[in-house]
């Protein structure tokens, strides 16, 4: 699973941030790693130098093998919280989608 990190001009994409993002994404999606080719992480700060309660946004888009992409977005007071929230939401979406898919495939294999 390849992880691509994109930031807007208001967020410095340094090694500490990249390490945090990779760690969070790998941990949240570890059960799906063999089913996902790439995860794109988009980070933005809507208010730049001004502070606000929900001015940092993280959108994560997972690209599963042979399927349309799934995306999840989370807004928070800082980048780390936004990344954590988006990863959790994306993992929940993937868990639901893959669970349904596995149930259907399992049900099709049962003898009638």
Image: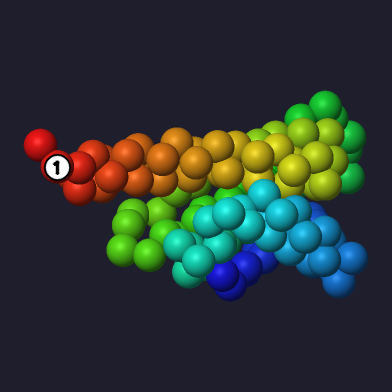
Residue 71 in percent (x, y) is at: 49, 46
User: Based on the displayed image, in which of its 4 quarters is residue 47 positioned?
Assistant: top right
Residue 53 in percent (x, y) is at: 82, 27
Residue 37 shows in the view: yes
Residue 42 shows in the view: no
* Quadrant (top left/top right/bottom left/bottom right) for the C terminus: top left
* Residue picked out by circle 1: 111
**Residue plotted at (14% across, 42% down):** 111
As drawn, 100 above or below 45: above
Locate residue 91 relative to residue 18 in the image: left or right. left
Q: Residue furthest top?
A: 53
Q: Residue furthest left?
A: 112
Residue 13 in percent (x, y) is at: 80, 66
**Residue plotted at (44% across, 48% down):** 70
Residue 25 in percent (x, y) is at: 68, 56
**Residue plotted at (80% across, 46% down):** 79
As drawn, 85 above or below 28: above
Q: What element does badge 1 sit on?
A: loop
Q: Viewer-proximal residue, 70 or 57?
A: 70
Characterize the local packing of mark 1: few (<14), some (14-19) or many (20 or more) Cα atoms within 10 angstroms. Answer: few
Tag count: 1
């Amino acid at each position: 699973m390849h992880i691509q990190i994109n930031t807007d001009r208001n967020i410095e994409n340094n090694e500490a941030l990249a390490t945090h993002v990779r760690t969070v994404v790998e941990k949240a999606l570890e059960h799906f790693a063999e089913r996902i080719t790439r995860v794109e992480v988009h980070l933005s700060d809507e208010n730049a130098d001004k502070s606000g309660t929900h001015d940092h946004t993280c959108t994560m888009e997972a690209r599963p093998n042979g399927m349309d992409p799934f995306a999840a977005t989370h807004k928070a007071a800082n980048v780390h919280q936004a990344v954590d929230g988006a990863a959790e939401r994306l993992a929940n979406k993937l868990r639901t989608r893959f669970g349904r898919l596995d149930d259907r495939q399992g049900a099709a294999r049962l003898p009638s």
